[in-house]
Amino acid sequence: MGIGDFIKKQFIDVLQWQEDGDGTLAWRHPMQDAEIQYGAQLTVRESQTALFVNEGRIADVLGPGRHVLKTNTLPVLTYLQNWDKLFESPFKSDVYFFSTRLQLGRKWGTAQPVTVRDKDFGMVRLRAFGVYSYRLADPKRFFAEISGTRDIYTVDDLEMQLRNLIVSAMSNTLGASELPFLDMATNFGLLGERMKGAMAPVFERYGVALDNFAVESVSLPEELQKAFDTRVSMGMAGNLAAFTQYQTATAIPMAAQNEGGLAGIGASLGAGLSMGQVMTEAMRGSVLPAASTPATPAAAETPEARLGKLKSLLDGGLITDADYTAAKAELLKQITG
């Protein structure tokens, strides 16, 4: 190695960072054993910030522009190094560049369902997904709290730490929103604003400014979705005419998928109408007040038989445990007098 190469390796006279779009938030300028030449040029591009760190202590922060590194441009470092006004020798300092541009389209989601209380369905487990955007607003705080002395710190590194914060904020926001699950789909904008308000102070603590937060979907786990669909279907049983119409509408597309096409609709309709009749007979005298039930041959059926029919509906998943328990209690009251 020649003397020229040795000098070039040991002294740095130009410091800059050309971002390559790989999602890097913080980048440490490679120093090895080199020293920064007094009067060196520091170029900080738009949407960048440069931070000088002296022996682990944060010193000067320089924004966009071209800077000549002298005592007057590095006042904090000058103080820490105890330089006098005539200092013109090379010096050692770690230099970190930070990207302050807006990070758009970052995805968030709940890896596991979050349990919240719903006023219609009690305790339910929800999953939510969406996007958000942010930017690095305070490099000094970000360095002290998050990135530290790493050579490179990326958006993926940051979002691994933010994920739990987002899930926690989402759980608290959904739990306090008092929005029933059925109304959430029409209130994603409101949920997003509430979650942004809840998370912005947390992001700020780490030197990050939350720009936007959007909720794109809220859903139940598959097994709960099936139970939810059954509950909605059975909710129509309160109006037996509507329930029969529901059974008929359900039978038509089901029959169309069979080999017999719409020719098989008779059996499906028969099953639907039969189910409506069973519900009517089973609920009479147990759920509906006796005064509102017209006298029919089915009304003379014993309470034990009606209880058996209700048990069949429960086993078939057509009524809930709560519905069955209430009807059973009424029937037992009739039996025991």
Image (cartoon, rainbow, N blue to C red):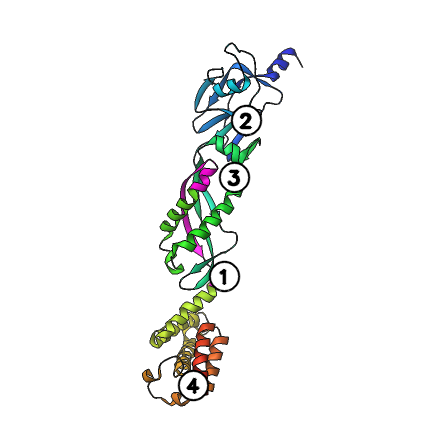
Q: Is residue 150 shown above or below 221?
A: above
| Lower position in the chain sequence, tag 4 or tag 2 | 2
Q: Give the range drawn in magenta.
A: 201-224
- Mark 3 → mark 4, Cα distance in angstroms: 65 Å
Query: Regarding mark 2 in the picture, which secondary structure is present there?
Result: strand
Query: Regarding mark 4 in the picture, which secondary structure is present there?
Result: helix
- Mark 4 → mark 1, Cα distance in angstroms: 39 Å
The 10 Å Cα crowd at callout 4, few under 14, some 14 to 19, many 20 or more, is some
- Mark 2 → mark 3, Cα distance in angstroms: 22 Å
The amino acid sitting under disc 1 is Glu
Query: Regarding mark 3 in the picture, which secondary structure is present there?
Result: helix
Residue position for label 3: 158
Q: Is residue 84 shown above or below 299?
A: above
The 10 Å Cα crowd at callout 2, few under 14, some 14 to 19, many 20 or more, is few
Q: Which residue is drawn at 40% across and 59% down?
A: 181
Q: Residue 95 colored magenta? A: no
Is residue 199 visible from the viewing direction of this image? Answer: yes
Q: Residue at x 32, y 82 (%)?
A: 292
Residue position for label 1: 222
Q: Is residue 175 shown above or below 291?
A: above
- Mark 2 → mark 1, Cα distance in angstroms: 52 Å
- Mark 4 → mark 2, Cα distance in angstroms: 82 Å
Q: Which mark is residue 334?
A: 4
Residue 296: x %, y % from top left: 35, 88
Work out which quarter of the rendered image holds the N terminus and state it. Answer: top right
Q: Residue 57 carries which label?
A: 2
The 10 Å Cα crowd at callout 1, few under 14, some 14 to 19, many 20 or more, is few
| Lower position in the chain sequence, tag 4 or tag 1 | 1
| Mark 2 vs mark 3: in front | 2
